Amino acid sequence: MYVSALTGAGAAVGGAAAAPGGGTGVALALSAGGALSSLELSALFALSVTEVHGVPIDEIERRRTIVMGGMPVAVRPRGARRGDAPLARVRA
């Protein structure tokens, strides 16, 4: 379901951006929206897999660590790295 949701969102954005008469601004806005929706779907997927494997996600800091651990380096907030201590606590 994750892959089909990402594929459907990407196809909708690509189709709308490729339509003639839409303009560059609309195409850029749709592309940005597509990127944000894929990040949101990826965060939801990471939390779902974590919960299925029995890791409690009740604490907000643990949820942030799980989501930020799966994000590309360019998207993470400044100072957040994969090797930070909160991530080590989740794996333990």
Image (cartoon, grey):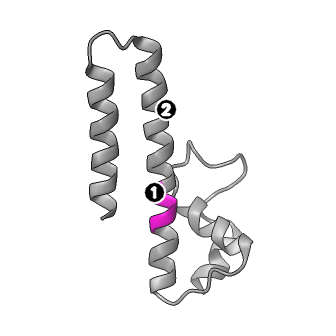
In this orientation, which residue lies closer to the viewer: 5 or 55? Answer: 5
Mark 1 burial class by Cα count in 10 Å: few <14, some 14-19, many 20+: some
In this orientation, which residue lies closer to the viewer: 72 or 44? Answer: 44
Q: Residue 59 falls in which quadrant of the image?
A: bottom right
Q: Which residue is mark 1?
A: 41
Task: Give the Cα distance between marks 1 and 2.
Answer: 14 Å
Magenta residues, as a range? Answer: 41-45
Above or below, 23 relative to 36? above
Q: Earlier in the sequence, mark 1 or mark 2?
A: 2
Q: Which residue is mark 2?
A: 32
| Image side of residue 62 versus residue 34, left or right | right
User: Residue drawn 34% across and 51% down?
Assistant: 6
| Image side of residue 27 versus residue 89, left or right | left
User: Residue drawn 68% across and 48% down?
Assistant: 77
User: Residue drawn 46% across and 58% down?
Assistant: 42
Residue 35 belongs to magenta span: no
| Image side of residue 29 versus residue 88, left or right | left
Q: Amino acid at mark 1?
A: Leu
Tell me how many marks there are: 2
The quarter of the picture where the N terminus appears is bottom left
The kind of secondary structure element at disc 1 is helix
Above or below, 31 relative to 47? above
Mark 2 burial class by Cα count in 10 Å: few <14, some 14-19, many 20+: few
Q: Amino acid at mark 2?
A: Ala
The quarter of the picture where the C terminus appears is bottom right
The secondary structure that dominates the magenta segment is: helix
In this orientation, which residue lies closer to the viewer: 15 or 46? Answer: 15
Residue 36, given in percent of the width and then of the height, sits at: 51, 43
Instruction: Residue 68: give its label.
Output: none
Residue 86, given in percent of the width and then of the height, sits at: 70, 72
Above or below, 76 relative to 62? above
Residue 44, given in percent of the width and then of the height, sits at: 50, 64
